[in-house]
Amino acid sequence: MDSVLGLLGILVGLGLLIWLAYRGWSVLLLTPLAAMLAAAFAFEPLLANWTQTFMAGAAGFIAQFFPIFLLGALFGKLMEDSGSVQTVAGFIGDKLGPRRGILAVVIAGALVTYGGVSLFVAFFVLVPMATALFRDAGIPRRLMPAAIALGTSTFTMSMLPGSPAVQNAIPMPFFGTTPFAAPGLGVIATVITVLFGLWWLGRVEAAARRRGEGFEAVASGGASAEQAATDPMVRERATVAREFDPAEVQRGAECANRPGVLVAVLPLLVVLAVNLTMTALVLPNLDLGFLAEERFGATTPAAVSGIWSVSVALAAAILVLIALNRRRLADLRASVDAGVNASVLPIVSVASLVGFGTVIAALPAFQLVSDWVLGIQGGPLVSLAVSTNVLAALTGSASGGLTIALEALGATYMALAADLGIDPALMHRVSVIGAGTLDMLPHNGAVVTLLAVCGSTHRESYRDIVMVSIVGALLALAAVIVLGTLFGSF
């Protein structure tokens, strides 16, 4: 009876969290209330679960991942205010032209996000570019969100090896992996996602042309962007979904004199090059035995090296960016302030979701959930994919859902990997791709923000977002699981 009540409490708490969060209530308040409600159903001590369990989980997430949130948001803001993102997007748009407008938007979005630019910064820069290209080519505006989502929110976040996205960093401490885990499988997943997404968008565009449907001159991209950046509902959902507070996009001082394309691209290349160098050459050759000392958390090099690699890469890129664009950054302090401030609400929001998950995982009834997940037919790779998918869908956050899943079951999956001879790098890649699929449901903050910035609605554009961001990613995930099962990690 206690287990049934405890399981009911978990479901009620989760349902309350989803319902009120979707209606715009702050997760900073909802998550502890939902956690306490679940604990009350299980007759567990409420205050202890709040101050000792919830706060410990939330604080642990902040302690582990704040450097990436902080540096990622700062890098994205400086790239925007220096005009570098606009230069990269404009260069690709000019080279490919309106006839290949969809491809241009996808490539531009992929380049800037794979280079470390925050997702929401990319949204606000890509929309004016996409608007111009789609208008000139007569492509329906309703396809803009799907084209931007394909380039920014799928393969560059979870599939491409070396991605500096925080979602790619989260499994590293749990599995002792690097940002380049299972590179071959990640590239295969990327190819599947890109080809399927471009095929779908091309098919829909061709059907629209046959019907005589062209570009709809609705609200301008600029007006929509400003409105979205200051909309409290959009902001509340967005800060749970990604690592940049959209309210800071309009702050700082944007440069009117944009850099050349080589100067604009160089900081993006620095992120990738330094990340690879730290991962493959520097950290493996350092004596990190001191990490076993209690004052450093009695940890291991494998648990921190991935975080260090991404953090150093972003920091190096920031220094290069400032050095190359110091005169273009009219008010460096304002840009820096906006960038670092943009990281605070997102990490605290996601940490609150993690705190909720920590309480749930500590309840006795969670054993029933754990047994069900681990008992899913198909082996640990399938159950890992299902658990990250479901939790990302329920929380509306890839990073939150992924962390909750790995906090609760990461050690169990590592033990299964050791027993069955599964490479942890394969578990890393499956978990990240899994978290990046169903997190794109209608209530996801990235979806809500993207639609608002594009001046579109769920009714007009969401079906195409589903096809390129969810269906394509699920096909890629299935391929990775099959290939990983047959051939292992590569």
Image: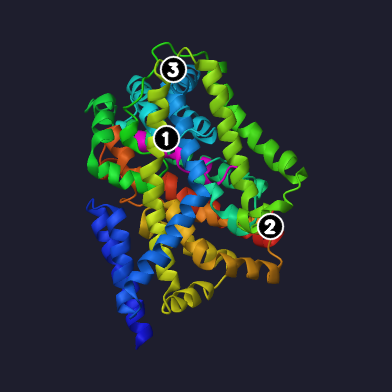
Q: Is residue 112 left or right of residue 305?
A: left
Disc 1 crowd rating (10 Å Cα; few below 14, some 14-19, many 20+) is many
How are the residues colored? rainbow
- Asked if one can make out residue 391 in the rendered structure from this viewpoint, the answer is no
Identify the residue under disc 1.
340
Q: Which label sits in the foreground, 2 or 3? A: 2
> Which sits earlier in the primary sequence, circle 2 or circle 3?
2
N-terminal label among 1 and 3 = 3
Q: Earlier in the sequence, mark 1 or mark 2?
A: 2
User: Is residue 285 left or right of 26 when viewed as pictured?
Assistant: right
Identify which residue, 6 or 114, lies in the foreground.
Answer: 6
The answer to whether any part of residue 72 appears in the image is yes
Q: Which mark is residue 329?
A: 3
| Alpha carbons under labels 2 and 3: distance apart | 42 Å
The CA span between labels 1 and 2 is 31 Å
Main secondary-structure element of the magenta-colored stretch: helix
Q: Which residue is mark 2?
A: 292
Q: Is residue 114 above or below residue 100?
A: below
Q: Amino acid at mark 3?
A: Leu
Single out the mark in the foreground, 1 or 2: 2
Q: Over which residues does the magenta segment extend?
A: 143-162
Q: Examine the image and state in which quarter residue 30 appears.
A: bottom left
Where residue 112 sits in the image (x, y, percent)?
50, 30
Q: Which secondary structure, mark 2?
A: helix
| Residue 204 image point, x, y percent | 38, 38
